Image: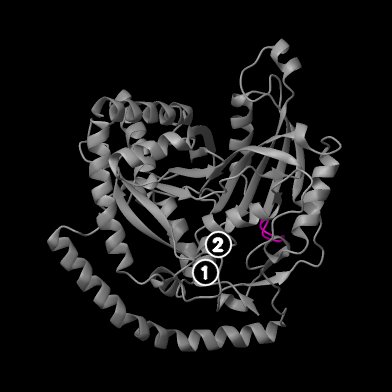
């Protein structure tokens, strides 16, 4: 029986019509490298061949009677690739604006829970930006694959691995193999599921007692770190901004590219990390964005940064092996180098604090999430607009997902960009996710449309902030 972990199931319970819990990706392809030429039928057949032997693509949910336990995964015996891979064409002129409008609309649509929780939209006719008719004649259009996978079945690392499974190192090479291919559990009857649910309910209090002692120790150590000034930033201490309120189902997307070597050069010159530099760039972009709107708070914005614990987790089951730390982005600091230095120090304390916490703490406590209770609580939270009444937990989520350092090919087409996009939440209607790939850092920004109508105004500041930071390093040198 392939039961969902508590953390995986929590993403199902947290989902509403407005708070959608899937992760997306904008994959820009050069179809000129496809052996024999590009066609949608050939692309869909390639995807079909790649997903058939991967359980994460061909399993669906089955609920436990009365919601007594988390759902289980079972094989979808009626799996049909045509229900998951769709074809669209961009309206003229097929530029960046048309692509962002279309993908924003697709990101706001929920996944069908009666099927495996993923879909792809193959979007043809992308000109790659604003180009004249003569330019378009000389430069063939690109193809974009817009992916959606539910957070219950992937986190950042596992999602990247699944997409990599559909890719190859050469146009005609075989797709890459997964390190740990999944398998299908049994498909028990209703009586067996009910019995398992009852047993879980009876043993739950014993598991709570088991977690109390280590959790109390963790709290005591956190208090000690706070007194010593070496604790990570605390939640519920973030300033309020226009994107920290109740969200709707409408989304808006923006993407940008950064030069990875520029990021690494800044890292080397300042004795920081790539993640420090990326966060400093995000902090600078948000600072200027809010300042131009007369919304810049006196205190720094607070970001939640997901941290993969795949290597240190003791749990074998579950797609989501992730923890999180909180860090200040230095939006209250005008000088870019001073912001980077301050952020690097905060990150060092946050990492040390995070490493002192059990890698499985979040997963262990998530086991006690109850579908009915979570669902009612989330709906009440949204309907009462409580996100606008209590102190802000955090301002946004920023994720840094490592990607392949070499060129990859998707169904024979070279990947020119891979922009990841995470979910947004009530109280934090903005998500920034970056992925490195073949010498580039691809930035994906997604927001609730009502919270941030012009997300392009933010995302275009990322390359500008990198240039500012690069110039500041050169001036100091």
**Which residue has dot 2 on it?**
12
Residue at (67% x, 59% y) in the render: 113
Helix, strand or loop status at disc 1: helix
Density class for disc 1 (Cα within 10 Å; few <14, some 14-19, many ≥20) is many
Marks 2,1: beta carbons within 8 A: yes
The residue closer to the viewer here, 178 or 124, is 178
Does 193 lie within the magenta span? no
Image coordinates for residue 64, horizontal then vertical, percent: 62, 76
**Which residue range is magenta in the image?**
112-117
As drawn, which residue projects farthest toward the left?
227
* Left or right for 112, reference 384: right
Badge 2 or badge 1: first in the primary sequence: 2
Q: Quadrant of the C terminus?
A: top left
Of discs 2 and 1, which sits in the foreground?
2
Other-residue count near label 2 (Cα within 10 Å), few / some / many at <14 / 14–19 / ≥20? many
Q: Mark 1 = which residue?
A: 371
Q: Residue at x 23, y 31 (%)?
A: 335
> Position of 249 compared to 61: left or right?
left
């Amino acid at each position: 029986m392939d039961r969902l972990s508590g953390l995986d199931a929590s993403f199902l319970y947290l989902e509403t019509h407005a708070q959608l819990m899937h992760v997306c990706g904008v994959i820009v392809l050069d179809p000129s490298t496809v052996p024999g030429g590009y066609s949608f039928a050939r692309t869909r057949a390639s995807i079909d061949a790649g997903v058939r032997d991967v359980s994460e693509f061909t399993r669906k949910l089955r609920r436990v009677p009365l919601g007594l336990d988390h759902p289980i995964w079972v094989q979808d015996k009626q799996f049909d690739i045509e229900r998951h891979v769709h074809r669209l064409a961009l309206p003229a002129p097929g530029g960046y604006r048309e692509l962002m409008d279309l993908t924003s609309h697709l990101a706001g649509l929920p996944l069908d829970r009666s099927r495996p929780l993923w879909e792809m939209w193959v979007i043809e006719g992308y000109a790659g930006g604003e180009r004249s008719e003569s330019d378009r004649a000389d430069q063939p259009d690109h193809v974009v694959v817009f992916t959606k996978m539910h957070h219950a079945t992937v986190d950042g690392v596992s999602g990247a691995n699944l997409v990599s499974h559909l890719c190859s190192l050469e146009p005609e090479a075989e797709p890459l193999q997964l390190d740990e291919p999944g398998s299908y559990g049994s498909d028990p009857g209703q009586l067996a599921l009910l019995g398992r649910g009852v047993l879980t309910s009876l043993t739950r209090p014993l598991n709570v007692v088991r977690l109390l002692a280590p959790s109390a120790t963790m709290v005591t150590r956190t208090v000690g770190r706070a007194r010593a000034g070496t604790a990570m930033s605390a939640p519920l201490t973030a300033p309020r901004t226009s994107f920290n309120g109740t969200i709707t189902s409408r989304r808006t997307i923006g993407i940008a590219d950064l030069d990875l070597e520029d990021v690494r050069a800044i890292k080397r010159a300042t004795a920081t990390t790539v993640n420090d530099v990326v966060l400093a760039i995000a902090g600078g972009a948000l600072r200027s964005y809010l300042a131009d709107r007369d919304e810049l708070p006196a205190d720094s914005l607070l970001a939640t940064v997901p941290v993969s614990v795949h290597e240190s987790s003791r749990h074998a089951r579950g797609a989501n092996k992730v923890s999180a730390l909180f860090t200040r982005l230095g939006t209250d600091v005008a000088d870019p180098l001073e912001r980077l230095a301050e952020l690097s120090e905060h990150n060092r304390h946050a990492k040390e604090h995070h490493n002192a916490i059990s890698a499985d703490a979040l997963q262990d406590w998530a086991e006690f999430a109850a579908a009915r209770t979570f669902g009612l609580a989330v709906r009440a939270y949204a309907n009462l607009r409580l996100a606008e009444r209590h102190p802000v937990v955090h301002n946004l989520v920023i994720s840094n997902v490592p990607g392949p350092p070499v060129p990859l090919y998707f169904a024979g087409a070279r990947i020119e960009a891979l922009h990841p996009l995470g979910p947004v939440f009530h109280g934090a209607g903005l998500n920034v996710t970056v992925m490195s790939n073949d010498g580039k850092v691809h930035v994906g920004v997604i927001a609730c449309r009502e919270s941030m109508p012009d997300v392009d105004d933010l995302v275009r500041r990322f390359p500008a902030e990198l240039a500012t930071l690069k110039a500041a390093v050169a001036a100091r040198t």
